[in-house]
Amino acid sequence: MTVGPVPGQLRAAARGNAGVSALSDVSVAYLSALAGEPVWARTQGGVRLRLPMRRWLGFPDAAHRADEALIRHCDGPSLDIGCGPGRLVADLLGRGVPALGIDTDAIAIAVSRRRGAPALCRDVFDPVPGQGRWRCALLADGNIGIGADPVRLLRRVRELLAPDGVAIVEFASAGVGLQSHRIRLETGGWSGSWFAWAQVGVDAAGVVAERAGLRMLEMEAVGGRHIGLLAHEIHCCASSIASLSIRGNGCSASSRYANSINVRSSP
């Protein structure tokens, strides 16, 4: 994994964009994290989860082995949807893989560009360069929840991919199923506005993919994170599907996909 910018460079990128008239809640969260404050996500049901902001910001001391697994599958032009501060885009470029990030947060885009990772301030449902030509599309860090409608999101991803392209998606743990929440971001002395988000566990991943016109090819568990590979239905030919097998028991998968998913587990 490539080494990201030092903390001072990250803060400089954020400060250069902190004068905008109204910071988004996500921008406030990133600025708080850069100042060393913890950031949480809270559901309306009262569940509170500390967010791995340092990993998302690309600090080397917070790197996770699953990031390596995510980008290992990117073997051609790759689009990182919800790229945040661009750590995965930067890593892909460092390996010689063409990559672009899109995100709706100005601070995240500024930090991404500061580290040399090209990124556009763009909603995934708006026009995106290269539509229908991307070899790989990344939905990491829970970004399958964008818009609180995973089926709609994956249908959009299918439109962005080339006919032989692959979506590389991070899912939640088994037992989560398909859930929609109202959540907000919080720091020690600040709370953001409520917004809609979704979670898809590995037990629901195959069904959600199928509804979007995609097929689950593989599920891999790495250090507690779960990475699935999805492809267009029409390019999952019978001969390739028949060659896949179940190896290990690191993830749970729906039994209806038991003959077509390669399930792998890494400690």
Image (spheres, rainbow, N blue to C red):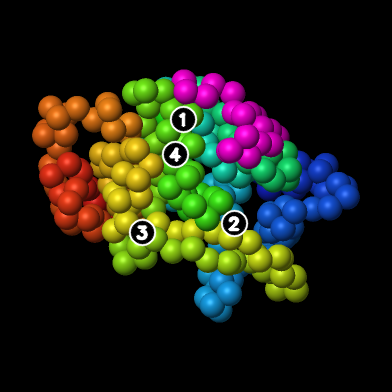
Query: Which residue is under mark 4?
Result: 155
Q: How many marks?
A: 4
What is the C-alpha distance between the residues marked 3 and 2?
A: 21 Å
Instruction: Please tell me whether residue 130 is drawn above or below residue 204 in the rendered image.
Output: above
What is the C-alpha distance between the residues marked 4 and 3?
A: 18 Å
Instruction: Please tell me whether residue 209 is drawn above or below residue 102 in the rendered image.
Output: below
Magenta extent: 112-134
User: Do residues under tags 1 and 2 come within 8 Å of each other at their CB atoms?
Assistant: no
User: Do residues under tags 4 and 3 come within 8 Å of each other at their CB atoms?
Assistant: no
Instruction: Examine the structure image and report whether residue 123 is included in the region drawn in magenta.
Output: yes
Query: Which residue is under mark 3?
Result: 201
Query: Residue placed at 63% from the left, 61% from the top?
Result: 195
Q: Residues within 10 Å of mark 4 (few under 14, many from 20)?
A: some
Give me the disc on residue 159: 1
Q: Earlier in the sequence, mark 3 or mark 2?
A: 2
Give me the disc on residue 53: 2
What is the C-alpha distance between the residues marked 1 and 4?
A: 6 Å
Instruction: Examine the structure image and report whether residue 223 is included in the region drawn in magenta.
Output: no
Number of the front mark, 1 or 2: 1
Query: Residue placed at 81% from the left, 43% from the top?
Result: 17
Q: Secondary structure at mark 2?
A: helix
In this image, 4 relative to 236: left or right?
right
Number of the front mark, 4 or 3: 4
Query: Residue placed at 72% from the left, 39% from the top?
Result: 110
Instruction: Please tell me whether residue 130 is drawn above or below residue 266 in the rendered image.
Output: above
